[in-house]
Image (cartoon, grey):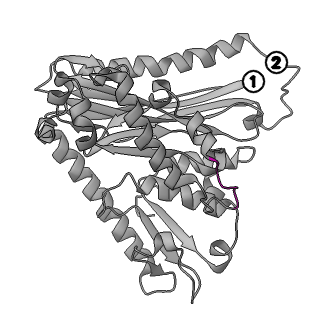
Amino acid sequence: MQSLNPWIDCRRILPGQNWDFEIKRALDKSSIVVIFLSHNSVNRRGYFQRELKIALDKSTEKLVDDIYLIPVLLDDYLQIPDQLRSLQFIHANAPKCNELIVSAIRHQLDRMGIDIQKTQQQEHVYWSSQQKREVWDGLPGYEVEFEFIEFRSDRYPNIAEIGEYVKGDLIQSIFRHREEKLIQSPDIYDYGQDTFLRTNTCDAFYRRPVIKGNVLSIQYTINWYGAGAAHPNFFFKTFSFVLEPLFLISSLEKVFAEPDSTFVILQADVREQLYRILIGDDSTGGAQPLDKDRIDSGTENWRDFSAFVFGEQGLEILFAPYHIAGYVCGPQLADIPYDRLAKLMRPEYQSALQVEHLLF
């Protein structure tokens, strides 16, 4: 489509591939999602509702004036889902429908490029990507595709080490997959099976880095499928660094002056948010409402808060599927504003995150 790179399942998914895994992976990597709505899709429980929920979850990461979801109406007199009513939609039979969709996509892509360039110039931190893909056919085989991030800066002379550290961490996964060449299971897998069903699949792509004061955070989403499993899954891997002096913030509890008492406060705030989001939620295509114990058991200690990002407005704590809820409910996010946390931080982290003004 006019030099764009659209992804649609019926054209991109190959015979034998796991369509559930590929659709979720495509949603995670997409910059913009065009949603085609009809009477059948809106009024029917099932996979469309799950796809819509994933896209809506990702939309919470965007700015309020970003173009991320573009609703296209295929039928007249269609009841628009409540979650999409705030968005400008277009009818498929409208004059120049395709041109308007392309125009909206290009507008957002141009804006994303300008915003990234502005952030890089303002912070004197520049990043680029390098991709690695490796495939081996076996019993089981493996397929990995990783996006590595590389940094440079005229302000922080050691910043390239961040990319080296992250790359080294991710490459450990490739090493583990290569080891499978020595651990074959012909009693479980055979070459008569679809290739996907006998292939361990893993990919890793990062979200745009966030710089808050003197702290840089990177969030990766790791999609994986174990050969023969009922369905794929994914989880989050995050990295946060103080830029000067450059070091890894290895755990969230190290940020706070009194970790034990802080955890009680943080735990209560996180649970309150998750209760509101998940308990009694019927937007998951027929899933049963969650019970409080499921959330509580997934927020018991600091290890449960190991996926975190220092966002522009607050601390973001990420929960993968199965961590606090069933797979069908997808990932969840708790966002704690800095004015709630600043007084609890160690002085050096107050300075690094530039939240001293919130102490008074």
Amino acid type of the residue tagged 2 in the rendering: Ser
Q: How many neighbours does mark 1 have within 10 angstroms: few (below 14), some (14-19), or many (20 or more)? A: many
The label shown at residue 185 is 2
- Residue sitting at the far top: 182
Position of residue 353 measured from the top left corner of the image (x, y, whole percent): 19, 33
Tell me the SS state at disc 1. Answer: loop
The label shown at residue 140 is 1
349 displayed left or right of 327? left
30 displayed left or right of 202? left
Residue sitting at x 50%, y 46%: 332
315 displayed left or right of 22? left
Tell me the SS state at disc 2. Answer: loop
222 displayed left or right of 100? right
Q: Which of 296 and 238 lies nearest the eye of the viewer? A: 296
Position of residue 150 measured from the top left corner of the image (x, y, whole percent): 30, 27
Give the quadrant of residue 334: top left
Tag 2 near tag 1, CB within 8 Å: yes
The range drawn in magenta is: 286-291
Which SS does the magenta portion mostly show?
A: loop
Marks 2/1: CA–CA distance: 7 Å
- Residue sitting at the far bottom: 77
